[in-house]
């Protein structure tokens, strides 16, 4: 007896389900390790932009700008970019702050993920 095509069973096999499950777990673990680094980058970028656009620092020197950034950094609990890691310059009468750093994230055994971040207050 022949079955018509609309009566055939459809679905996912057990091995297919296992592969999909393992893939979802690996993606979730990767996301849980990478998202905090990306969040920290955007927080650092916001701190740099806030420091560069602070009206109280318009005629300030390098030490004062670094000190203002350090105060913001301590409040935001950021430690990836310190005040000494900033490149500070003046362009057209406004302060421009740039930074760059790398973040190495250990995944498993001898596998790591290297993220390179760069940012500027002029963006």
Image (tube, helix red, strand yellow):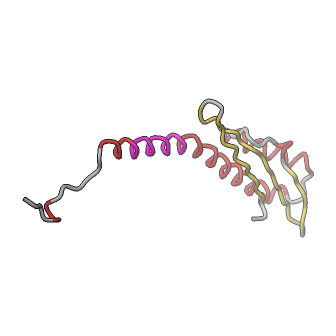
User: In the rendered structure, which segment of residues is drawn in magenta?
Assistant: 19-31
Q: Quadrant of residue 119?
A: bottom right
For the view shown, which residue lies furthest in the right direction?
61
**Magenta segment, prevailing SS (helix, strand or loop):** helix
Choose between 27 and 53: the one closer to the eye. Answer: 27
For the view shown, which residue lies furthest in the top direction?
109
Percent coordinates x, y for residue 86 in the rendering: 84, 48
Left or right of 54: which side holds 75? left
Choose between 36 and 54: the one closer to the eye. Answer: 36
- Magenta span includes 122: no
Question: Which residue is rendered at x = 75% and y = 65% of the image?
Answer: 123
Left or right of 15: which side holds 63? right
Choose between 9 and 26: the one closer to the eye. Answer: 9
For the view shown, which residue lies furthest in the left direction?
1
Rendered view: 64 above or below 74? below
Choose between 30 and 76: the one closer to the eye. Answer: 30
| Quadrant where the image shows the N terminus | bottom left
Percent coordinates x, y for residue 103 in the rendering: 71, 42
- Magenta span includes 23: yes
Rendered view: 2 above or below 38? below
Question: Which residue is rendered at x = 79% and y = 60% of the image?
Answer: 55
Percent coordinates x, y for residue 91 in the rendering: 89, 66
Percent coordinates x, y for residue 113 in the rendering: 66, 42
Question: Which residue is rendered at x = 17% and y = 65% of the image?
Answer: 5
């Amino acid at each position: 007896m022949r079955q018509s095509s609309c009566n055939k069973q459809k679905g996912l096999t057990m091995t297919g389900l296992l592969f999909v499950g393992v893939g979802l777990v690996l993606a979730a673990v990767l996301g849980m390790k990478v998202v905090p680094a990306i969040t920290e980058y955007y927080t650092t970028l916001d701190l740099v932009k806030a420091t560069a656009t602070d009206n109280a620092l318009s005629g300030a020197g390098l030490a004062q700008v670094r000190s203002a950034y350090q105060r913001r950094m301590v409040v935001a609990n950021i430690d990836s970019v310190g005040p000494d890691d900033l490149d500070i310059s003046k362009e057209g009468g406004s302060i421009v702050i740039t930074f760059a750093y790398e973040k190495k994230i250990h995944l498993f055994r001898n596998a790591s993920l290297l993220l390179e971040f760069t940012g500027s207050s002029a963006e």
